[in-house]
Image (spheres, rainbow, N blue to C red):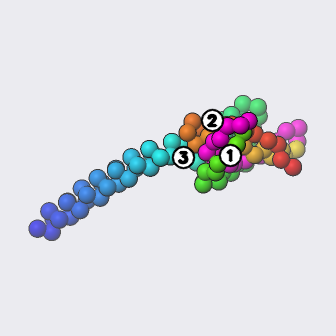
């Protein structure tokens, strides 16, 4: 009987895990890791990146009268021998960079 219970418990565990993943995917379209990857690919088109970061918790922002739920992050690029830092916002729904600004 213990083998049957172990198989049943493993099956239930897999089913619950699958359902939980489906729910998470439904509510969170783009993961922070994917958002950072998209932003880095966008910045790399203009030169190499030496560092990057992203906040894991999305925040609500307003840009040009539109409201977004977005991840905030940043990259460091070496431009003409100087490190330049940029902060950006990536839309949670699409993964697109919606704003970028150079910081000090």
Magenta span includes 18: no
Task: Indicate whether residue 77 is drawn in magenta.
Answer: yes
> What residue lies at 78% left-to-right and 44% top-to-bottom?
86
Q: Which mark, residue 61?
A: 1
- Residue 73 at what x, y percent from top left? 69, 48
Provide residue 1's location: percent of width, then percent of height.
Answer: 11, 68
Residue 80 found in image quarter? top right
Q: Nearer the viewer, residue 43 or 96?
A: 96
Q: Nearer the viewer, residue 74 or 26?
A: 26
Asked if the residues shown at circle 1 and circle 2 are in contact, with their CB atoms under 8 angstroms apart, the answer is: no
Task: Looking at the image, tell me whether mark 3 or mark 2 is earlier in sequence order.
Answer: 3
Q: Secondary structure at mark 3?
A: loop
- Distance, label 1 to label 2, CA atoms, is 14 Å
* Residue bounds of the magenta highlight: 64-81
The dominant secondary structure in magenta is strand
103 lies above or below 13: above
| Disc number placed over residue 31 in the picture, else none | 3
Name the spot of residue 69 as percent of width and height, x first: 61, 45
Q: CA distance from mark 1 to mark 3?
A: 18 Å
Residue 50 visible to an observer of this rendering? no
Q: Which mark is residue 96?
A: 2
């Amino acid at each position: 009987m213990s083998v049957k219970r172990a198989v049943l418990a493993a099956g239930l565990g897999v089913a619950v895990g699958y359902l939980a993943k489906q729910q998470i995917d439904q509510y969170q379209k783009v993961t922070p890791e994917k958002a950072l990857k998209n932003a880095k690919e966008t910045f790399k088109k203009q030169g190499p990146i030496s560092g990057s970061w992203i906040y894991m918790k999305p925040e609500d922002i307003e840009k040009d009268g539109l409201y977004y739920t977005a991840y905030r992050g940043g990259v460091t690029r070496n431009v003409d021998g100087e490190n330049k830092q940029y902060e950006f916002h990536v839309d949670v729904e699409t993964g697109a960079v919606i704003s970028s600004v150079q910081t000090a």
